[in-house]
Every structure is written in structure tokens, then in C-alpha cells.
């Protein structure tokens, strides 16, 4: 089963290595990994998507690591998730309009136009990117790369006083 974990850590050398080692040492596969700074100086957020059984005990062990500040599991129904994908699609000049129109339906942005291909950048939920890939596959996908998934808890799942400010 896939789990999405958000781990806030001190921005120090070796922290990512220690966190990822905990997963590999237990035989858990990391499906996606994204790391970046937070709004607080000196802190980073690691977003991991892992294939693993129940993680309750594992989250407690992860929280005990030096430099780990907060560990949160984000349930799919409670999370806003996004990834970025760059995909190069085979495309002869006569098909450019059709491929471009299809890409536009997904909000994809053309970032390179070559004589026999078009490269798009598209962002969205994992399901959105999968749908885009399915639509481009008949033309021929030459190359594809995705970022790690990032996620935050939906505000609508929090206290009503936090949604839209206090009233």
C-alpha cells in the first residue's frame, strides 16, 4: 500500500540520507521523494511516497531521528498533491495541431519544438499526469521524467475557523 509522508527536518547535511536509510533498511520502496525548503529558515520538508504496510510504529521511529522535527502521514482524501512532468512526444508537422490541442486540454505548456517532436511540461495530481500520458502514448512517447510528489493537507479538512480566516 502507498503512503505519503511529510517530514519536516532541520536543514543540515546528512538528514536526507538518514531518513531514506530508515526506509531501505526495512525493505520499503520509496516510490517518490521531493525535498525543499519551507517557509521557516533552517527547515526543509521531505515528501515521500512509500510502498509499505502500516507505518504507525515506523513514524514513531522516524520522529526519534536527530534533526527530525515533525512527521505527518497524509491520507489521499485529505491531501493536495502535485507533480511536474516533462514529456517528449513524437510529432511530425502535420500532427502538431492535434497534439498541441490535446496537450492544451491538460494545461500542458510546450517548452521545446523540434522537427519531429514536441516537449511539454505539465503539472497536476498523479492521476492528471497519468491521463495526460495515456493521451500522448498513441503519438509515441520518446522521453518522460517526473518530479517527486509534493503534498500538503487540505485546509477544508481543518477547523472551519482556519478556512478563509477567523470570522
Image (spheres, rainbow, N blue to C red):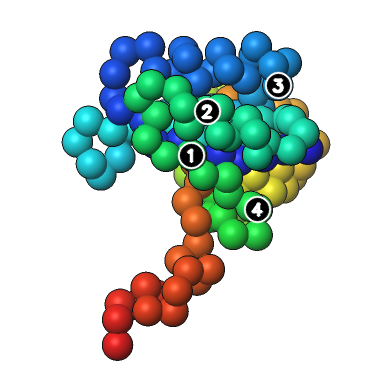
Give the alpha-carbon distance from disc 4 to disc 3, as whole Å. Answer: 19 Å
Counting from the top left corner in percent of width and height, residue 25 is at 65, 11
Q: Which quadrant holds residue 89? A: top right
Label 4 vs 2, first from the N-terminus: 2
**Looking at the image, is mark 3 or mark 1 nearer the viewer?**
1
4 or 1: tag closer to the N-terminus? 1
Label ID, residue 76: 4
From what the image shows, is residue 109 above or below residue 9? below
Residue drawn at point x = 74 percent, y = 30 percent: 52
**Which element carries disc 1, helix, strand or loop?**
strand
Position of the N terminus, as image quadrant, is: top right
Q: Nearer the viewer, mark 4 or mark 1?
A: 1
In the image, what residue occupies the spot 70% across and 21% down?
29
Q: Are marks 1 and 2 in contact (CB under 8 Å)?
A: yes
Quadrant of the image occupied by residue 93: top right
Mark linked to residue 28? 3
- Percent coordinates x, y for residue 86 in the rendering: 54, 31
Q: Earlier in the sequence, mark 4 or mark 3?
A: 3
Where is residue 99? Give x, y as percent: 65, 44
Front of the two marks 3 and 2: 2
Amino acid at each position: 500500500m502507498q503512503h505519503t509522508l511529510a517530514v519536516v527536518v532541520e536543514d543540515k547535511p546528512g538528514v536526507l540520507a538518514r531518513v531514506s536509510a530508515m526506509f531501505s533498511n526495512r525493505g520499503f520502496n520509496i516510490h517518490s521523494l521531493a525535498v525543499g525548503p519551507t517557509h521557516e529558515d533552517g527547515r526543509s520538508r521531505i515528501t515521500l511516497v512509500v510502498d509499505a504496510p502500516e507505518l504507525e510504529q515506523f513514524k514513531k521511529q522516524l520522529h526519534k531521528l536527530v534533526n527530525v522535527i515533525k512527521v505527518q502521514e497524509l491520507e489521499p482524501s485529505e491531501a493536495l498533491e502535485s507533480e511536474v512532468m516533462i514529456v517528449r512526444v513524437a510529432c511530425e508537422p502535420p500532427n502538431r495541431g492535434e497534439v498541441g490541442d490535446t496537450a492544451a486540454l491538460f494545461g500542458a505548456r510546450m517548452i521545446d519544438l523540434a522537427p519531429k517532436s514536441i516537449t511539454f511540461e505539465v503539472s497536476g495530481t498523479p492521476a492528471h499526469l497519468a491521463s495526460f500520458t495515456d493521451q500522448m502514448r498513441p503519438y509515441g512517447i520518446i522521453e518522460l521524467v517526473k518530479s517527486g510528489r509534493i503534498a500538503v493537507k487540505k485546509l477544508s479538512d481543518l477547523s472551519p475557523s482556519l478556512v478563509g480566516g477567523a470570522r
